């Protein structure tokens, strides 16, 4: 009798098929195994595989705006994966032969694209050029870190077909007034990226400042902050009104400070490219969810 099929790995990522983006959950197995997919609720995809579960018991936190998390357990000789969704989308299934055998569940990211497509998002990387901004204990510069997170924001938003306008080039330091002048009419929102800095090097954490001229911006800032700190596990420093952002009038405008760069733990986070990616994705998802809950 051949050894029983075992499921050995579970992961999720975002990928493209042509022009369309998908959130994919992949289950790896030692051999082909029968799969059943059902939807006990519109936002719950249940995948049952006739195989033994020999992997980390989870849950797998994804939080990419489509997939919230995957929980797994064994019942009656079968492995059950509960894929909790933020959107009522159904999966296409692809099984890929090979070692390992892969069961891929592809969920369209169209709800995010439908929201962002053709919207103009202005991204404002703080400082630049001769202005380094705050400096970390091991010499990372706020200017460069803001540029990195801003680049991830731009990449994600362009992938969702938004029109991205940057207020500066990499080696440039326009004045605040020059940056404002680069905001095109009809822009949907303005996202400034900085890092916080403090003479007290024990201070840590993430903050999101907002434009108080538009009443909804405080709630928007809170939603973005919550999503970021949940994802990257930094302490929350809170939200606050920002005097400069007032000049953006009725525009939803935020100033995101992903870390306190003068703290060595926080500075270390900035060295991980995934930190910038996660922060950017959390921001993009939080903004979409905030506006969709309200409409
Ligand atoms: Zn700054």
Image (cartoon, grey):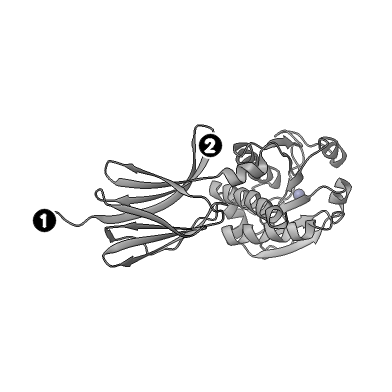
Q: According to the image, label 1 marks what residue?
A: 1
Horizontal relation, residue 239 to residue 49: left or right: right
Q: Position of residue 224 (x, y in %)?
A: 68, 56
Q: According to the image, label 2 marks what residue?
A: 20
**What SS does tag 1 mark?**
loop
**What SS does tag 2 mark?**
strand
User: Is residue 200 visible from the viewing direction of this image?
Assistant: no
Q: Earlier in the sequence, mark 2 or mark 1?
A: 1
Residue sitting farthest toward the bottom: 75
Q: Nearer the viewer, residue 115 or 29?
A: 115
Real-space Cα distance between discs 2 and 1? 43 Å
Q: Quadrant of the rendered structure where residue 172 is?
A: top right
Q: Which mark is on residue 66?
A: none
Horizontal relation, residue 105 to residue 2: left or right: right
* Residue shown at 63% from the left, 42% from the top: 114
Label tally: 2
Q: Position of residue 146 (x, y in %)?
A: 68, 45
The quadrant the N terminus occupies is bottom left
Horizontal relation, residue 232 to residue 190: left or right: left
User: Is residue 42 visible from the viewing direction of this image?
Assistant: yes
Q: Position of residue 24 (x, y in %)?
A: 45, 47
* Residue shown at 56% from the left, 53% from the top: 87
* Residue shown at 68% from the left, 62% from the top: 201
* Residue shown at 85% from the left, 46% from the top: 248
Q: Position of residue 2 (x, y in %)?
A: 14, 54
Q: Answer few, some or many: residues within 10 Å of disc 1's Cα (few below 14, many 20 plus, some between 14 and 19).
A: few
Q: Answer few, some or many: residues within 10 Å of disc 2's Cα (few below 14, many 20 plus, some between 14 and 19).
A: few
């Amino acid at each position: 009798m051949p050894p029983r099929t075992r499921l050995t790995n579970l992961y999720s990522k975002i990928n493209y098929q042509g022009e369309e983006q998908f959130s994919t959950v992949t289950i790896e197995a030692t051999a082909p195994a029968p799969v059943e997919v059902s939807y006990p609720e519109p936002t719950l995809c249940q995948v049952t595989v006739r195989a033994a579960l020999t992997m980390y018991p989870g849950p797998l936190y994804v939080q990419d705006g489509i997939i919230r998390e995957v929980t797994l357990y064994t019942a009656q000789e079968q492995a059950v994966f509960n894929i909790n969704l933020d959107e009522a989308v159904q999966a296409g299934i692809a099984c890929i032969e090979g070692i390992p055998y892969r069961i891929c569940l592809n969920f369209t990211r169209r709800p995010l694209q439908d929201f962002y497509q053709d919207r103009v998002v202005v991204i404002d990387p703080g400082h630049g050029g001769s202005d380094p901004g705050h400096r970390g204990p091991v010499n990372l510069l706020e200017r460069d870190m803001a540029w990195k997170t801003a680049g991830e924001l731009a990449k994600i938003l362009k992938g969702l077909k938004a029109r991205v306008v940057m207020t500066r080039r990499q080696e440039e330091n326009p004045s605040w007034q020059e940056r404002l002048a680069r905001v095109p009419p009809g822009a949907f929102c303005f996202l400034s990226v900085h890092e916080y800095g403090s003479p007290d090097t024990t201070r840590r954490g993430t903050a999101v400042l907002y434009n108080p001229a538009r009443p909804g911006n405080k709630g928007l800032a809170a939603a973005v902050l919550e999503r970021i700190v949940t994802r990257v596990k930094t302490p929350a420093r809170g939200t606050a009104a920002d005097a400069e952002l007032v000049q953006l009038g009725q525009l939803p405008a935020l100033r995101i400070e992903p870390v306190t760069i003068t703290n060595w733990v926080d500075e270390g986070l900035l060295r991980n490219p995934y930190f910038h990616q996660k922060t950017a994705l959390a921001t993009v998802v939080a903004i979409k969810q905030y506006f969709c809950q309200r409409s």
